[in-house]
Image: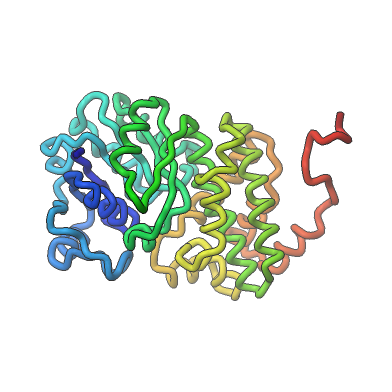
Amino acid sequence: MAKVTVLGGGGWSIALAVVLNDNGNDVTIWSALDREVNDLKETRENKKSLPGIKIDEKIQVTGDLNLAVKENNPDLIVMGVASSFVRQTAARLKGLTKPGQVIMNVAKGIEEATLDTMTDMIEEEVPDAITAVLSGPSHAEEVAKHVPTSVVVGCKDQEIAKKIQAIFANDVFRVYTSDDMLGIQVGAALKNVIALAAGCADGIDCGDNTKAALITRGMAEIAELGVAMGGNMLTFSGLSGMGDLIVTCASMHSRNRRAGILMGQGKTMKEAMDEVEMVVEGVYSAKAAYKLAQKYQVSMPIVEEVNNVLFADKPVKDALNDLMNRDLKAEIKRGLWEK
C-alpha cells in the first residue's frame, strides 16, 4: 500500500483516485476550489466533470494543501490540475514536500510563454523533486467505470517508474513504463491540437477518409517535432502517441473533438469552449505547438491551420482547402529515392 495525494478535483483526478483506492492505497484528493471540496465531501461526486461516479468514503478530501502534502507525507503526489494551473500549483508546494518527493504529472500541455513541458515546470518550481508522467488513451469516464485501459508511465529513474506502475496497475488498468518523458509529453500535448482539427472536420461533415488522414498526418507532424526535440520515435507509435491521438480524435468523450465540431459548425472558439464547459487543452497548446515548430524548423501545416482557425477567425472549410492544396510531396522522407 502507498500513500498518494492527488492534486485536483476534476474528472481525471477522481478517476485516478478511484483506481488507486481500488488497489488498496491510502488516497487524499486536494482541490484549490472551496466549492469543489465542499461538493465532493457532501455528495462524494463531481457531478459536472464525472457524474455518476461516487468517491469511496475512505478517500480523504481536503482544501488544505499543508495537510494533503506536508502532514500526510505521501509516497507519491499526482499533479492532476489543468495544464494552465500546473506551474502555480507546483509553486505552492515549496516548503511542503520532502527532498526527493515523487511528483507525477497527468495534465497534457505545453506552457506557451516558456515552451516548457509540465514536468519542466514542476522541476523548476520544486527543484529537489523527482518527476514522472502518466499518459495514454484513457478517458476519465471509462477509467472510473473500470473499462479496460492501458497507459504508460515515464520517468528517468527506472525503479521509480516500476514503483508507480505497481501502485496503479490492476486487472482493468494496465501500466507500461518508459524512460522517454519528453516524447510522452509532446505526444500528450499535441494530440489535443490535432483532435481540434478532427472535430472541425466532423463539424463540416467530412467523412472517415478525412479523419484517418488527419490522424495519420497529424501524428507525422507530432513525431517529427518530438524527435527534433529529443524524443524517441518509437514513443509516437505507442500509447502516449498514436494511441492517445486515435481516442482523442474519435471519441465524443473528447472535449477537444467536441469543441472542434462546434467550431466547424460555425461557432467561435470562445462559444465552443463555453458550450463544452470544461478546459479544452488543445486551445492552450496550439500556440505553443506552432512556436515549437518554428523553433525546431519543423513543418506542421495542420497545427498552423488550427491556429488560424482558433486565433485568426479563418473558416474551417478554407483551412481544409488550403491543407489539401499544398505543394505535392512524398509521404516518407529518407526513402530510396533520396539515397
How far across and how far down the image is residue 218, in percent? 64, 51
How far across and how far down the image is residue 260, in percent? 56, 66
At a point 49% along the width and 69% down the height, the residue shown is 272
At a point 44% along the width and 49% down the height, the residue shown is 150
How far across and how far down the image is residue 296, in percent? 64, 34
Residue 195 falls in image quadrant = bottom right
In-front residue for pair 87/239: 239
In-front residue for pair 259/58: 58
Q: In which quadrant of the rendered image does the C terminus lie?
A: top right
Residue 142 falls in image quadrant = bottom left
How far across and how far down the image is residue 332, in percent? 77, 42
Q: Is residue 30 above or below residue 146?
A: above
In-front residue for pair 14/289: 14
At a point 35% along the width and 32% down the height, the residue shown is 162
Residue furthest front as drawn: 171
In-front residue for pair 189/184: 184
